[in-house]
Amino acid sequence: MTWDWQQPDWPHFTWDEGRLVLAEQQFLVGGGVLLGTVKHLGEEERNQLTVEAMSTEALTTSEIEGEILDRASVQSSIQRQLGLAADNRRVAPREQGVAEMMVDLYRTFSAPLSEEMIFAWHRMLMSGRGDIKDVGHYRTSDEPMQVVSEAMGAPRVHFEAPPPAQIPGEMAGFIGWFTRTAPGGAEPLPALTRAGAAHLYFESIHPFEDGNGRIGRAIAEKSLAQGLGQPTLIVLAATILARRGSYYHALEAASKQNEITDWLAWFAGITIEAQRRTLALIEFLIAKAKLFDRLKGQLNERQQKALLRMFKEGPEGFKGGLSAGKYSTITGASPATATRDLVGLMEKGALVRTGELRHARYNLSVPLKPVQRVVIGRNGELVKA
């Protein structure tokens, strides 16, 4: 098997620009819509959006790699670093490290990408990892860096990265390319094209012992933010996680050649879907603000606590609906009080009920907007799959 970095045209990627024209236009339009919609949020809702989007990215970019983190700890760490009110919980190194990377990505999106920045991100991600030899610098092990799976006892190599001796030169080339293709650079590329190519380029080098996927996705998000001229706050990793199987398949296929149209089309569809997911989150936060404004002075402390807990689940909704038992767990109310409070919330238009008696479940009355998958067709058309 010959990988992309072993071929004579590496790293001179080629693609069909025409297939991406509509997607590039849609991404820029979507960026404008997001910016305009955010302006309708109050300061509290804007802060909530920032923390929610960043913590979701931190959690899901880790989950893609099979690492499950504690949401409350990640959110608390992000809030503290942004100077927002947070609890005093002790945050473990893994949660602290990925939170630090997301905050740094948010704050320095416009700064040039450098080797020092990438090394700093790696140190953040590997915080507390005693099993990693090369922290904050490129891998040095002579063992082949391979992505391998086993099916029916037979190992299958999905990708093999360049040997350590090549990495410094390859990374110097990558950082130089990222600089040239930036807005205002010598060879500027459209936003989606640059971000997708950057992610694939970095993953093909695979410069670290661990953390390549998380840093590669951070670089893609940095590229998208530079393309829009502002932090995107789009839930890219969360959307990739929802399409994890096709993500790995698309990356593997793209790593075998340097004609990357199919990969860029896949990445463009995922990014536009992620952008729409963020817009759904913003509209959800606006609906939340309007609901609490309408009910100001009409809720008791228990009802307010329960509603805030339900809104915390985001636009996908409270899983399974809220039962009287769950309400009691959240608020400490007795069964009779829980039922009375829930009926009151329903009468005020805050909740809607399905089922009866012990099967009754309550959901927020605000509209929930599940986002459909977006695919870029062969002729560049955007298709909802």
Image: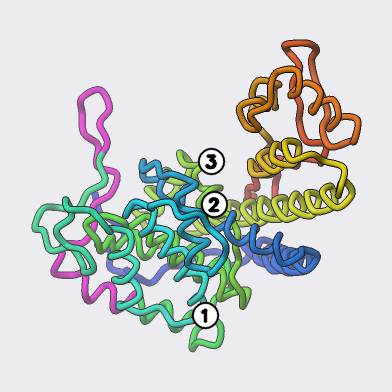
Q: Circle 1 sits on which residue?
A: 110
Q: Residue at x 78, y 49 (%)?
A: 288
Position of residue 146 in the picture relative to residue 68 (left or right): left
Instruction: Name the one closer to the observer, 3 or 368.
Output: 368
Is residue 384 in view? yes
Q: Quadrant of the C terminus?
A: top right
Q: Residues within 10 Å of mark 3 (few under 14, many from 20)?
A: some
Q: Earlier in the sequence, mark 2 or mark 1?
A: 1
Instruction: Answer whether labels 3 and 2 touch (C-beta < 8 Å).
Output: no
Place residue 27 in its image quadrant.
bottom right
The residue segment tinted magenta is 149-174
Q: Circle 2 sits on which residue?
A: 266
Instruction: Give how far across and how far down residue 113 sits, in percent.
Output: 40, 78
Instruction: Give how far across and how far down residue 291 sits, in percent.
Output: 84, 47
Give, as a three-letter code, the residue at label 3: Ala
Instruction: Give how far across and how far down residue 177 sits, in percent.
Output: 40, 78
Q: Which mark is nearer the camera, 3 or 2? A: 3
Q: How many marks?
A: 3
Q: Which mark is residue 242?
A: 3
How far apart marks 2 and 1 lie (CA) works out to 25 Å
